Image: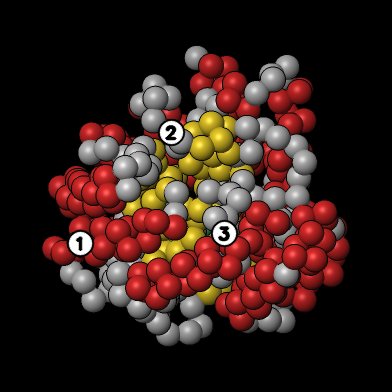
Amino acid sequence: MGLVYRTLVRPMLVFQDSEKAHTRSVRMLRLFSNNRLTRVFLSAVYKTRKKLEVPLFGDVYQHPFGLAAGMDKKGEAINGWDAIGLSFAEIGGVTMLEQTGNPKPRMFRSSKHKALVNRMGFNNPGSENMQVRLQNHFERFGKPKIPIWLNLGKSKLTDNQNAHTDYSTTLGRLWDYTDVFVVNVSSPNTPNLRDLQGEEELRKIILECVKINSQKAKEIGSSAKPILVKVAPDMSFEQLERVTTVAMESGCAGIVATNTTISRPNELESDEKLQETGGMSGQPVKDMSTQFIRHIYQYTNGQFPIVGVGGIMNANDAWEKITAGASLLQAYSGFVFEGPSLAKAVVSGLETKLRQHGLDRIEDAIGLWHKENE
Ligand SMILES: Cc1cc2nc3c(=O)[nH]c(=O)nc-3n(C[C@H](O)[C@H](O)[C@H](O)COP(=O)(O)O)c2cc1C
C-alpha cells in the first residue's frame, strides 16, 4: 500500500492545492472510518498487529507512534487514526475562541525536500463548538479506543497578558473528552505566541491549566490528566533548559519536541515553496528536533518524558528519536509524503531494530544513544 501511495497518489498531489488535498484526505478518512464495514477494511490493510507497549501518562500505549497536532484540527477523523494503526492522536490546536486563521493560500508543499511550510494561524472551531463535536462523537461511537490528546492554542484576539485563561478555559471545556493536554506556546503563526515560552509567562499558563485540571478531576473524583508543553526548535539550548525546568517545576508530565521551524537552511534557498513565510516541517526539521530531544534527555537525566516529533518519514528516523530519548513519537508531514501505511512501516521497522539490538522492549531503547556514546 505504501508503494501504491508513493507511485500513484503522491505524484498526483503536485497538481492539487496543499490545503484542499489535506482537507479531502481527512474527510475521506472520516467517512471510511465512521462506517463499520469500511473501518474494518481500513484496519485490515493498515493496522499493525505488532505490539511495542509503552506504559506512560497513565495509559499503556500499544506502540510509540501517534498523530501530531494540526492534521485533525477539528477532531473529525478520530476513528480513523486508530483504524490506520496509530496508538494515539493529538487533535487541535484548539483555541478558546473560534477562528478562521490566516488568508489562503497558507500551506505549501515541497515533495523534493519532503517538507511543508504552513501559516495556518490556528484555524479551528473554538472550544465551545469543539465541546459539542466531541460530545456528539462520544454519544455516537463511545470513548475512542486510543488516547486522544488535545493541543491547546491561544486565540488571536486574546493578548498574551490573558493567555493563561484562554488556554485553561479550553482545557476545562474539553477535559471530559481528552486524555492528555499539550500547551502549545510554539506555533510561529500567531503573533508573539512564542514569547509565551518565556519563564514567567509559561509558568503562569501551566499553573492555571494545572489548577483547572485539578478542579475538573476533583469534581468527578478521579485523578488529574497529564499536561505537556510543546516547544519550538528555534531557541538556544539554554532557553530550552529554562523551558524544561519551568515545565518540570510547575507540574507538567513531559515535553513535546518540536514544533515547526521558522529557520531556512541555505540548501533550501532554491525551493520557492519553502521560502514562504511560516513554520517548516518534515525532513528539514528532523535533525533539529532530534538534537532537542537529546539535549532534554541529557539535561533531565532521562527523568522527564519526551514526545519526539519532526521529520519522521520511516523507521530509521523513528529509531533515531527513540534512542535520542523520546518515549513516544508523532508525525504530520510523514503522512503527507509516505501515506497512511506509515504507522505500520514504522512500528514493524522499530520491532526489527529492537531485535537487531538484542532488546526485548521498546523502553530499553529509549535514550540508548546516550549509553552508547557515554
Ligand atoms: C499544516 C500544519 C498545521 C499544524 N498545526 C499545529 C497546531 O495546531 N499545533 C501544534 O502544536 N503543531 C502544529 N503543527 C506542527 C506539527 O504538529 C509538528 O510539530 C511539526 O509539523 C513537525 O512534525 P512533522 O515534521 O512530522 O510534520 C502543524 C503542522 C502543519 C504542517
Q: Quadrant of residue 338?
A: bottom right
- Residue pointed to by mark 3: 142
- Residue drawn at 63 percent across, 32 percent down: 53
What residue would you read off at disc 2?
A: 305
User: In the rendered image, which residue does mark 1 sit on?
Assistant: 165
- Horizontal and vertical percent position of residue 370: 51, 21
The residues tagged by marks 2 and 3 sit, at their Cα atoms, a distance apart of 29 Å
The percent coordinates of residue 152 (x first, y second) are 36, 59
Residue shown at 28%/34% (left/top)? 248
Pick whichever, 370 or 301, lies toward us.
301
Label 3 crowd bin: few (<14), some (14–19), many (20+), radius 10 Å: few
- In the rendered structure, the answer to whether residue 97 lies left or right of residue 345 reads left
Looking at the image, residue 7 lies above or below residue 292: below
The amino acid type of the residue labelled 3 equals Gly
Decide: is 269 above or below 57: below
Q: For this rendering, which residue is in front, 205 or 112?
A: 205
The amino acid type, in three-letter code, at marker 2 is Pro
